Amino acid sequence: MVTLGDYLIVSGILFAIGFAGVMLRRNLIIILMSLELMLNAANLSLVAFSRFRVQPMGLPDYNVQVFVFFIITVAAAEVAVGLAIIVALYRARQTTDVNDIKSLRF
Amino acid sequence: MNSLLPWCSLLLPLVSAIAITLFTHRSRALSSFISIGAVLGSFVCSCLIFTRHGISAREFNWIDFVGVFRVPFGFVLDNLSKTMLVLVSGVGSLIHIYSLGYMRDDEGKSRYFAALSLFMFAMLGIVLSNNFVMLFVFWELVGFTSYVLIGHWFERDAAADAAKKAFITTRIGDFGFMLGILMVWAATGSVVFAEIAPRLSTVTSHPAFLTTAALLIFCGAVGKSAQFPLHVWLPDAMEGPTPVSALIHAATMVAAGVYMLVRVGFIIQASQAALLVIAWIGTITAMLAALIATQQNDIKRILAYSTLSQLGYMVMAVGLASNEAAMFHLFTHAFFKALLFLAAGSVIVMLHHEQNIWKMGGLSRNLPITFLTFGAGALALIGCPPFSGFFSKDAILAVAYERNMPIFVVGLLTAFLTAFYVIRLFVVVFFGKARSEIARKSNESPAVMTGPLIALAFLATLGGFAFFARNFLVLPLEKNIALFVPALAIIALVLGSGLAITLYHNRKSERFDIELFRRLFYFNEFYSWLINWTQEFLARISAFCDRWIIDAGVVGGTSGGTWGIGALLRLVQGGNLQAYLFLFGLGIVTLIYFAVFH
């Protein structure tokens, strides 16, 4: 029997992997991918909560599952914007390494 | 009518001062007549008060915080204040008239008479006050007018400096006086003399408190009556016009300290320690001033030191718990010292403001009236038998003989010195040959100046007779010490005068040069050094505060602190995206930790 705890552990592992990716990798695209991973970890936990929150008639709470679709849609739009920025940056600087982007640094 | 008399007596001079200042400043003659009229009116009122019995003035509440602090504006009318009233307004009247001659051609005559009137107001206020606060207000007002009058010729640096010196020095004493008043108020809850007296028993169980309060009050008298160690201002105050020296710095204001001590005698006499200190301060002042006077060459300064010396006698009498003797001497001293100063003023004016006694000489022929009156004053001052000073000084010496032998011995020695320096002055100024051209050609002063001299000479001569003085004062013990004390006093007198006559008759210049006395025991040097040192010390402290606390601490600290925090924060803000993220994550984890586990 898969419990809520199992889902949350998977979600936590995914989030940790994503966070580590954002923190440790230098490539902007991979950072963006790791970000998506963290986002989806959050989605996963949200869906799990919805599944295990049983309504009076024995059905799960579908409101949240609908909400997750919205999040996925918004995330897709966000990725589009993010990728566009990265492309623009690459055109300007010929790099996607975060350490090379330092014109605003002290 | 009767209840208005004290008010008239007090307020007439004030009205005159205001009128002169506001309206008649331009007309010098009118101003002087207003002032003289006011003081004469005041004198008449005082005489009426003195002769009538049962006069009481209405008093009203000036400050009244119910139950906490009440200051009435009321008068005390007993024998003591009545006597002082007549004395002050009487001597004041004579000196006002004399001023008419002395200040004849002075540019600032209006200002002079306005200040003189204001002084009369303040002095009468001191005499009449029935509580400490009122007394203190008038006390300060007297100090202020003294300042104005010493600095009357303010364009002369010496006069301006002397005025400042007098004001500041007396302020030191007045500060103590104020503290003393506060202590008495704190202990008894009242500032009115009549109310303090019965409540004093609550304090007498704390002798240290009482002694401190009494000595602090005495501080006021030390400043005002120029006692050691605050005596330095009085000789310098001679820079003022001579009538001012006579009125304020000899006859009345400096005696106000003694009057005040007598007025609050019930507080002082409750503490034996305070009495002893007061007696010795008086004795030291008397001796010190007499020693200095033997080596002075300025006619007014010699008189100033003799004033110090005589004030010392009065304070000595207060300290010996003999208020009567103190008041008696105050009374006779006011006459003969005013007389001496006015006679000296007559000499000075006729010699075109020459004050050095070694440039005078032989004036007995040219200024006969001045000579005779000065002689009467001098004999009274040294205590020659028929003159007033003999009786009063004898009274003090008799008290000293009874109560404190060492003080008596010093007092007797001072009497000897007094005779010596006064006769020295007298011989050098009036006998021998004229030592300068001006002295040779001098002649007698006008009647407006000699008139008051003659009047004062009579008073100085007769003022000591018991039948005369008894009307005013409760006289001290009858001569139950037989003839011993007066005999000793007369021996001291004869020795002193004889020595002075043999040493100084027909001399052209000073015989001795005792630098210690001539330089006034180095008091001025010592005070300059002290003030210098204090100033330097305070300046160093302020410089330290400014440099290290304000500049380095507050200003430098703020800027340095901001800079340092900025430098630290700059390290964190390295621009590394992932470092930010790491810190961000760390922050969230910490937050969660605290939110969940605490």
Image (cartoon, coloured by chain):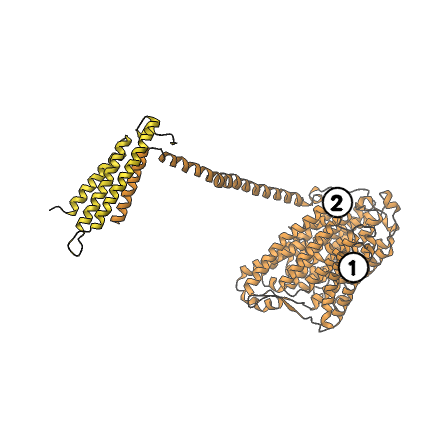
Chain colours: A yellow, B orange
Nearer to me, B65 or B147: B65
Q: Residue furthest left?
A: A1
Q: Chain of mark 2?
A: B
Residue receiving disc 1: B35
- Disc 1: host chain: B
SS for callout 1: helix
Q: Which mark is residue B207?
A: none
Q: Residue at x 54, y 61 (%)?
A: B207
Residue in view at x 74 percent, y 65 percent: B9
Q: Residues within 10 Å of mark 2 (few under 14, many from 20)?
A: few
Q: Is residue A94 left or right of residue B123?
A: left
Mark number for residue B156?
Answer: 2
Q: Position of residue B576 (x, y in %)?
A: 33, 33
First in sequence: mark 2 or mark 1?
Answer: 1
Q: Position of residue B403 (x, y in %)?
A: 64, 61
| Tag 2 secondary structure | loop
B565 or B41, nearer to the observer:
B565
Q: Image height check: is B577 above or below B126?
A: above
| Marks 2 & 1 on one chain | yes
Q: Is residue B279 left or right of residue B344?
A: left
Residue situated furthest top in the rendering = A94
- Per the model, the C-alpha gap separating discs 2 and 1 is 26 Å
Task: Give the mark toward the camera: 2 or 1.
Answer: 1
Position of residue A20 measured from the top left corner of the image (x, y, whole percent): 24, 35
For mark 1, does the 10 Å Cα neighbourhood hold few (<14), some (14 to 19), or many (20 or more) residues? Answer: many
Q: Amino acid at mark 2?
A: Arg
Give the x, y percent position of residue B165: 68, 48
Give residue A78's quadrant in the image: top left
**Which residue type carries mark 1?**
Ser
At 56% from the left and 43% from the top, the residue drawn is: B538
Q: Is residue B547 visible?
A: yes
User: Could you tell me if the residues under marks 2 and 1 are in contact, i.e. CB atoms within 8 Å?
Assistant: no
